[in-house]
Image (cartoon, rainbow, N blue to C red):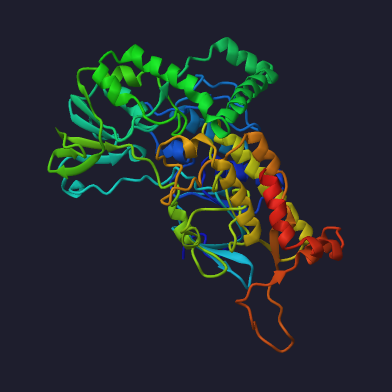
């Protein structure tokens, strides 16, 4: 029997990256210790554990890319590398006493809602358990995506994704193909260019690249941040404020980004003297439509004599020969895919079975949507961190994670207020109203109007990834849980002398009952339940 067979916990957190560890810390701060963190790997870190490719670093300043409740005065650089961020997360696990809650090598295979017991049945690689509440913090950048390329299976050389870097494979002197030009690729290219014999970059779409203003943080600065913590807080506040001011251009006035484009073109011109190469590298879409990438050594690396830029995507593999969509060919020994992740089709959704017996993937087949980026209709007591439309195009995701942790904390408080065995299920009307308002705001943003196809968009072209506002707006929208937006569930009633008749049915308690237990009159709550919930949701999204 597996070590954790038949265990029951109040909360099961899935994933131990920033979202999962943040949730664990927040649970402890709320006085909850009856929880586990289920991690499929053997250590914490999430994407900062998985992505260890050469040159891996964050494109958000260090002092903003960290928890507000766990400041780090000793960041070594303005933009920290992967090893420093991963070490930071290990320290968070230690300092906040999370180790006893961590369950490594416990990949979630299936989560099924039990409507009779109002709990989740969870099957993991290390055994089974049940939980009253599930917090899914697997993140959108956890499952690599490699495109289906004809002939790839027969390639005789080495093939791997940037998020699964093979450190045992020696690239020195090799002919290497880099497929993709996203945030990972522009860090990998300059890191491996001096080592390889020849580097061929398959570029389907060129990115906009701005200089990365990185530098070492001096010992004096670090000493000051340790001795006078308010100086680090001020630094963080300044970094946050600058990015909040930029949001208007991305969300309401994309035409204002033209000046930024000119700066990006000058940045390119300084390093790329060849007009033909400059033409290949110049995007034909508005800057900001795809994530603006930061690098000071990407363009210089592309100008080196051992680098070829193919301005076309990889279309076919014929033995050791790679064929681009424009017919260009390259003989290579290794292929590195920097082709992103399953963001709008997260694999975890296939493993979550809700109240109606459907998987989350089935419910989201027409596009992801969740109330305030957290709750999906038909999946009671299930919350996601970095859910639909919570991503950012210009700031730190840690800010969004902390807002969702506030929402999680109030969600648990509401369950406590309601008392007994209880669950909350987001009303479809509230979910749809929230999502409708978000999508309406999205129409004028650069991500929808900029003329590009990005990983922010799902298969139908809908932006289900990005939040169309400031982080302060999202913080306000997730400050508390509105019970009018949820259906309150209790175990199915049993009549005397009868068994669990109707156990499979969901017990929908009216918002009136919820209002009575939270100090509100049944009449007032009943008047506002149903239709008014949708209005409340839409209003909060404005």
The answer to whether 264 appears left or right of 247 in the picture is left
Q: x%, y% of residue 210?
A: 43, 21
Q: x%, y% of residue 98?
A: 59, 43
Image mark count: 0
| Quarter holding residue 421 | bottom right
Q: Residue furthest top?
A: 220
In this view, 340 is above or below 224: below
In this view, 8 is above or below 478: below
**In this view of the protein, which residue sits in the foreground, 465 or 108?**
465
The answer to whether 156 appears left or right of 380 in the picture is left
Q: Is residue 405 visible?
A: yes
| Quarter holding residue 277 | top left
Q: Residue at x 48, y 23 (%)?
A: 258
In this view, 316 is above or below 219: below
Q: Residue furthest bottom?
A: 497
Q: Is residue 194 visible?
A: no
The answer to whether 277 appears left or right of 37 in the picture is left
Q: x%, y% of residue 5?
A: 52, 64
Q: Residue at x 24, y 20 (%)?
A: 276
Q: Residue at x 31, y 16 (%)?
A: 300
Image quadrant where one finds the C terminus: top right
The answer to whether 415 appears left or right of 205 in the picture is right
Q: x%, y% of residue 106?
A: 46, 54
């Amino acid at each position: 029997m597996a070590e954790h067979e038949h265990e029951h916990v109040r909360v099961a957190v899935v994933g131990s990256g920033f979202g999962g560890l943040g949730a664990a810390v927040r649970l402890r701060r709320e006085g909850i210790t009856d929880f586990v963190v289920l991690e499929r790997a053997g250590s914490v870190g999430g994407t900062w554990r998985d992505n260890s490719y050469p040159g891996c670093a964050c494109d958000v300043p260090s002092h903003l890319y960290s928890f507000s409740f766990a400041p780090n005065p000793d960041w070594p650089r303005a933009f920290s590398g992967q090893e420093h961020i991963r070490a930071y997360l290990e320290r968070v696990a230690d300092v906040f006493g999370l180790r006893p809650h961590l369950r490594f090598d416990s990949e979630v295979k299936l989560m099924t809602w039990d409507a009779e017991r109002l709990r989740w049945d969870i099957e993991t690689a290390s055994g089974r358990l049940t939980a009253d509440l599930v917090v899914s913090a697997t993140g959108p950048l956890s499952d690599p995506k490699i495109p289906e390329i004809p002939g790839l299976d027969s390639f005789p050389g080495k093939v791997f994704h940037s998020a699964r870097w093979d450190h045992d494979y020696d690239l020195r002197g090799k002919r290497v193909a880099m497929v993709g030009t996203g945030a990972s690729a522009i860090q990998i290219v300059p890191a491996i260019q001096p080592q390889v014999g020849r580097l061929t970059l398959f570029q389907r779409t060129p990115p906009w690249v701005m200089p990365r203003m990185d530098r070492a943080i001096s010992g004096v600065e670090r000493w000051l941040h340790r001795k006078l913590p308010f100086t680090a807080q001020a630094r963080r506040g300044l970094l946050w404020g600058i990015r909040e001011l930029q949001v208007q251009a991305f969300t309401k006035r994309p035409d204002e980004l033209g000046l930024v484009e000119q700066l990006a073109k000058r940045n390119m011109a300084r390093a790329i003297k060849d007009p033909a190469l400059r033409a290949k590298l110049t995007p034909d879409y508005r800057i900001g439509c795809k994530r603006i990438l930061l690098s000071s050594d990407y363009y210089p690396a592309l100008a080196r004599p051992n680098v070829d830029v193919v301005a076309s995507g990889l279309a076919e593999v014929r033995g050791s020969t790679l064929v681009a969509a424009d017919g260009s060919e390259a003989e290579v020994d290794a292929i590195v895919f920097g082709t992103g992740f399953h963001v709008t089709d997260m694999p975890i959704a296939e493993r979550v079975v809700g109240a109606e017996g459907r998987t989350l993937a089935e419910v989201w087949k027409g596009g992801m949507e969740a109330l305030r980026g957290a709750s999906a209709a038909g999946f009671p007591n299930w919350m996601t961190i970095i859910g639909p439309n919570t991503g950012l195009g210009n700031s730190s995701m840690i800010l969004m994670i902390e807002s969702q942790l506030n929402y999680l904390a109030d969600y648990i408080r509401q369950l406590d207020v309601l008392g007994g065995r209880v669950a909350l299920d987001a009303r479809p009307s509230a979910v749809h109203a929230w999502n409708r308002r978000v999508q309406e705001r999205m129409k004028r943003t650069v991500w929808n109007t900029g003329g590009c196809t990005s990983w922010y968009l799902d298969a139908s072209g809908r932006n289900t990834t990005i939040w169309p506002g400031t982080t302060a707006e999202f913080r306000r929208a997730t400050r508390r849980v509105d019970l009018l937006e949820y259906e309150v569930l209790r175990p199915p009633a049993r009549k005397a002398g009868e068994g669990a008749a109707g156990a499979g049915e969901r017990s929908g308690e009216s918002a009136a009952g919820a209002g009575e237990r939270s100090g509100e009159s049944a009449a007032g709550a009943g008047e506002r339940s149903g239709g008014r919930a949708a209005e409340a949701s839409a209003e909060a999204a404005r």
